[in-house]
């Protein structure tokens, strides 16, 4: 029959016994649950109430890896603890069988034990809160459950109570402190510190051994009469655990003397684990893990602290860092490159806009666009200056255009296309009639001075009485307007066509196709005469809304005493304004002419009459009433203008100033295209052709040519201002005469034919030469000599040479002869025979960096001298003649098929940064230009910063 | 450094980014495979590891 203890527990069997007492397996009678009864054979001296309290605390302990304490009771002075029954076997059993466990398994168990110990050690139990030390950790006190987890058993309640002899001391597993050894002192001896005899100490649930412990299977100590109390603490549990792990791994119990413990082999077990166990088993408790948590952390981090993992992480870190840097670096480079490319693209566009604006005559706009394309400050996001932008600015400013002539100045935009245009005598203002207003603007600053309503007809006209007064076809009648006062001076009857006498005293006006004309006193607007046309009227379009055909004559002579008028029936008459009667009939209504042009010059009336079959021109002396000259043509019509400066007759591509009596004509213009419109100020002449407008000087020499993509229907030139307008465009182009005499180097008779001009090295002479001859001048303009070059037809090439021997003209003949003439006095220096020149017409030019090869009919090729690689091609339209290296660039010179010589300034990468029209020579970094009007002019090469400053100052 | 043009910066940078991305992807795959092998080995030696370092 089984024994019932405390009326509750039925003893099933004895499980074991040891130094702490006897252990029974029992059955809770009521709960029908197996429990463990542990009867502590040591006498309990603690008071019952304290005992109760302690056990109550222990009952509260709850952890997965610690068996639950249910109860205690005292029977026959023996304290029995009732503990949860743990199924399984203690780990000493398989060890005894010689089994070994895998490292991974041991580590798992170690972590579980440490979790239990961490819980146990935590000072969170009871009041006052404290922790508990197990003090007898060994394989026998670790139960392996069927599920593979462990449970830490044999928690010593006596120890919890602080009873004497409560500390377990299992040999090999017990820490040195259990034996009273303390290796933590600085001057510790190997045997450790002696123990004090008779003294006791109590610490949170642990108890030091007071005297030597008997040697038993539970452990032994090497006690002796000591001098101090050493109390095992949590670090003792750490040691015991370490020793337990040691045994579980190696299968051997560690030496009971801590200092004699042989560390586990790192070849057999992981180095980290060996180090952990070794540290846990350090004889010096201060050098062990100081808590279960610390050791648990070390075990949990075995993976992460493994050298292989660390190496893997390091490799990763390096790889990701490198790749990230590449990614970021590549991204930054890509972004930078993209921004710079975009900036370059926008600059190229701005350069193009600048060119377009310049072509349209908007110089200010061209400069603005070009300046936008040239950065002020350098930054990483901004690329280098694009040569196109630099060229655009140079072109817009005309820095290297030193010719005298009319240069693009600006534009004025009207609200709509013009019908009529006039310019003031000084050229400083202009009046344009558009639908249906008149805009007066300042040609200097392109500002609008007035915008006045006019007669709602394209036939409305305006005339300048003087620089400040205009007489125009106002909205409800002819009006005189003062520009400076901005007020109307007088008004008259409705009018469209208006004409003034040369003396400025009379104004004649006709309204559309009315059959009369009114003559006004320009001073006050009084009507001084009315001329009745007897039912005849001017030829007007059926629809006068869109254009003024300008095919009628309304003209006054110098003093306003005579008025000429043409009529729609083909008649042309001159009226005496004193009587109002017809004074002279030039054509009657049977003439058949449909277009008339002309005017008065002094007493002479010059006119042309045209129909589909013929055109006639005639000059009539109105005093003598006889014709003084004239001609007729069946192929082209005559354009005629006459004013107080003369009679001008245009036919096809020729414009002449005609003497009214002798018929002698002074050519003003001869060009290759048909003249559409013309105007002259007596010195300079402006004409328009189909797609250009051109300026000619007093010698009928071409000064400037501007291409036009719109028809030039209106041209005016006065003072130093020229205007060009079109019925197709609302823009009026303003050009101003520029004089660059400050850059004058030399002047000569422009009739002297020559191909090239050179300045001597010593700067004292100028040579003008071609294959046929050369002329040598002093800088004062005196002709030193003129030499005809013999056998000019056999000349292969000419070279003007400047070297240490001076300057000379060398002539190469096809047969190999070479002659040289001095550039100082024109004397023949030598004549010798050399190799027959290579007729392949291939030339090579060298600079420091480049080799430029020019072949006939091919674009010159630029090669890098170091690498031999082709760098680029130069212009292929014209022939390359010279290449000169200057600071920071190259000057290349070309000649066109018709002999026009010009140059280009290239930057160090052989990109064009400036056009150099009429360039003839480069000497000491100076550019010399040879203009057709007989002027040699000189300029230096401007740096881009200088050009920008010039642009800014002009803009302001 | 005249040979470093804007186009070279852009396209070179772009090529570098693409190459870096490709290498990154390849390396991530290789690294993952290597890690799995290593983890298996370490799990064998040390048992199952916690998800992150304590």
Image (cartoon, rainbow, N blue to C red):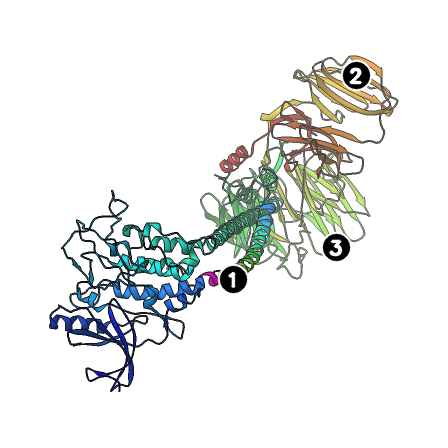
Can residue A929 be seen from the camera position used here? Answer: no
- Residue at 66 percent across and 50 percent down: it is A710
Pointer 1: residues within 10 angstroms few (<14), some, or many (20+)? few
- Quadrant in the picture for residue A641: top right
- Range drawn in magenta: B36-50
| Magenta segment includes B48 | yes
Tell whether A1 sits left or right of A698: left
Residue A820 image label: 2
| Chain under disc 3 | A
| Magenta segment includes A70 | no
Circle 1: element type: helix
- Residue A468 in percent (x, y) is at 50, 41
| Chain under disc 1 | B
- Residue A177 in percent (x, y) is at 25, 54
- Residue A786 in percent (x, y) is at 77, 17
Identify residue for label 1: B36
Q: Are marks 3 and 2 in contact (CB under 8 Å)?
A: no
Can residue A801 be seen from the camera position used here? Answer: yes
- Residue A381 in percent (x, y) is at 51, 45
Residue closest to the eye, A680 or A900: A900
| Distance between the alpha carbons at the discs numbered 3 and 2 | 74 Å
Q: Tag 2 or tag 3, which sits nearer the N-term?
A: 3
Q: Which is closer to the viewer, label 1 or label 3? A: 1
Identify residue for label 3: A589
Vertical comparison of A377 with A594: above or below: above
């Amino acid at each position: 029959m089984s024994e019932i203890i405390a009326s509750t527990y039925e003893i099933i069997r004895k499980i074991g016994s040891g130094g702490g007492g006897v252990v029974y397996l029992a059955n809770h009678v009521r709960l029908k649950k197996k429990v463990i009864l542990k009867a502590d054979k040591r006498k309990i001296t603690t008071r019952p109430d304290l005992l109760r309290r302690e056990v109550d605390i222990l009952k509260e302990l709850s952890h997965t890896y610690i068996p639950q304490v249910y109860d205690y009771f005292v029977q026959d002075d023996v304290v029995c603890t009732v503990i949860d029954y743990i199924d399984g076997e203690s780990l000493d059993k398989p060890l005894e069988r010689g089994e070994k466990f895998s490292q991974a398994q041991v580590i798992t168990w170690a972590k579980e034990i440490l979790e239990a110990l961490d819980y146990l050690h935590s000072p969170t139990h009871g009041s006052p809160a404290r922790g508990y030390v197990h003090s007898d950790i060994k394989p026998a006190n670790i139960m392996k459950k069927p599920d593979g987890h462990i449970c830490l058993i044999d928690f010593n309640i006596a120890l919890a109570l602080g009873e004497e002899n409560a500390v377990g001391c299992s040999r090999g597993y017990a820490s040195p402190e259990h034996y009273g050894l303390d290796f933590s002192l600085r001057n510790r001896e190997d045997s450790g510190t002696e123990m004090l005899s008779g003294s006791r100490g109590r610490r949170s649930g642990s108890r030091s051994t007071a005297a030597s412990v008997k040697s038993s299977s539970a452990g032994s100590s090497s006690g002796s009469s000591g001098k101090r109390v050493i109390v095992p603490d949590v670090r003792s549990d750490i040691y015991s655990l370490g020793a337990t792990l040691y045994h579980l791994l190696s299968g051997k119990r560690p030496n009971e003397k801590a200092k004699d413990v042989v560390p586990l082999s790192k070849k057999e077990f992981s180095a980290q684990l060996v180090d952990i166990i070794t540290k846990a088993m350090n004889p010096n408790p201060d050098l062990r893990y100081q808590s279960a948590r610390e050791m648990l952390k070390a075990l949990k981090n075995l993976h992460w602290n493994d050298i292989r993992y660390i190496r893997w992480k390091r490799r990763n870190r390096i790889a990701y860092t490198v790749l990230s840097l590449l990614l970021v670096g590549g991204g930054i480079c890509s972004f930078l490159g993209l921004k710079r490319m975009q900036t370059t693209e926008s600059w190229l566009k701005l350069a193009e806009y600048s060119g377009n604006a310049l072509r349209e005559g908007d110089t200010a706009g061209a400069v603005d666009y070009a300046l936008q394309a040239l950065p002020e400050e350098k930054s990483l996001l901004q690329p280098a200056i694009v040569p196109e932008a630099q060229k655009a600015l140079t072109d817009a400013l005309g820095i290297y255009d030193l010719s005298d002539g009319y240069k693009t100045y600006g534009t004025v935009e009207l609200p709509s296309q013009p019908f009529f245009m006039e310019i003031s005598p000084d050229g400083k203002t202009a009046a344009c009639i558009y639908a249906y207003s008149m805009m007066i603007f300042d040609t200097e600053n392109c500002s609008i001075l007035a915008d006045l309503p006019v007669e709602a007809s394209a036939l409305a006209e305006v005339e300048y009485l003087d620089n400040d007064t205009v007489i125009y076809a106002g909205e409800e009648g002819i009006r005189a307007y003062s520009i400076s006062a901005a007020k109307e001076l007088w008004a008259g009857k409705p009018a469209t066509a208006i004409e003034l006498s040369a003396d400025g005293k009379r104004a004649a006006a006709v309204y559309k196709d009315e059959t009369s004309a009114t003559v006004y006193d320009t001073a006050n607007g009084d009507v001084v005469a009315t001329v009745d046309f007897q039912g005849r009227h001017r030829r007007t379009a059926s629809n006068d809304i869109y254009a003024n055909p300008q095919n009628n004559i309304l003209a006054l002579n110098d003093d306003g005493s005579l008025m000429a008028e043409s009529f729609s029936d083909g008649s042309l008459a001159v009226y005496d304004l004193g009587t109002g009667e017809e004074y002279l009939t030039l054509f009657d209504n049977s003439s058949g002419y449909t277009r008339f042009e002309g005017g008065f010059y002094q007493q002479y009336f010059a006119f042309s009459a045209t129909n589909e079959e013929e055109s006639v021109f005639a000059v009539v002396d109105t005093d003598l009433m006889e014709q003084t000259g004239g001609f007729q043509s069946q192929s082209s019509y005559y354009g005629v203008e006459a004013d107080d400066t003369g009679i001008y007759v245009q036919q096809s591509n020729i414009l002449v100033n005609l003497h009214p009596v002798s018929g002698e004509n002074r050519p003003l213009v001869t060009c290759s295209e048909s003249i559409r419109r013309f105007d002259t100020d007596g010195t300079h002449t402006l004409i328009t052709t189909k797609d250009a407008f051109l300026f000619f000087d007093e010698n009928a020499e071409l000064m400037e040519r501007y291409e036009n993509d719109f028809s030039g229907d209106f041209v005016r030139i006065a003072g130093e201002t020229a205007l060009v307008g079109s019925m197709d465009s609302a823009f009026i182009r303003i050009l101003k005469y520029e004089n660059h005499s400050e850059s004058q180097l030399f002047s000569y008779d422009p009739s002297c034919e020559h191909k090239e001009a050179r300045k001597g090295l010593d700067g004292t002479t100028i040579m003008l030469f071609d294959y046929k001859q050369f002329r040598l001048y002093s800088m004062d303009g005196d002709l030193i000599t003129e030499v005809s070059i013999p056998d000019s037809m056999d000349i292969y090439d000419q070279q003007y040479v400047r070297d240490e021997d001076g300057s000379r003209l060398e002539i190469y003949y096809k047969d190999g002869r070479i002659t040289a003439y001095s550039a100082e006095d024109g004397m023949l220096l030598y004549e010798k025979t050399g190799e027959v020149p290579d007729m392949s017409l291939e030339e090579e030019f060298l600079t420091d960096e480049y080799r430029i090869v020019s072949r006939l009919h091919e674009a010159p090729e630029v090669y890098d001298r170091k690498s031999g690689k082709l760098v680029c091609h130069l212009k292929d339209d014209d022939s390359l003649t010279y290449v000169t290296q200057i600071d920071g660039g190259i000057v290349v010179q070309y000649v066109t098929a018709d002999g026009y010589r010009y140059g280009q300034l290239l930057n160090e990468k052989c990109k064009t940064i400036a056009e150099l029209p009429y360039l003839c020579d480069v000497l000491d970094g100076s550019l010399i230009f040879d203009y057709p009007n007989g002027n040699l002019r000189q300029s230096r090469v401007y740096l881009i910063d200088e050009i920008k400053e010039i642009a800014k100052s002009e803009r302001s | 450094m005249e040979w470093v043009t804007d186009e070279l910066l852009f396209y070179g940078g772009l090529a570098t980014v693409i190459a870096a991305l490709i290498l990154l992807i390849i390396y991530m795959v290789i690294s993952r495979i290597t890690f799995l092998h290593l983890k298996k080995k370490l799990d064998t030696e040390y048992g199952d590891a916690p998800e992150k370092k304590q």
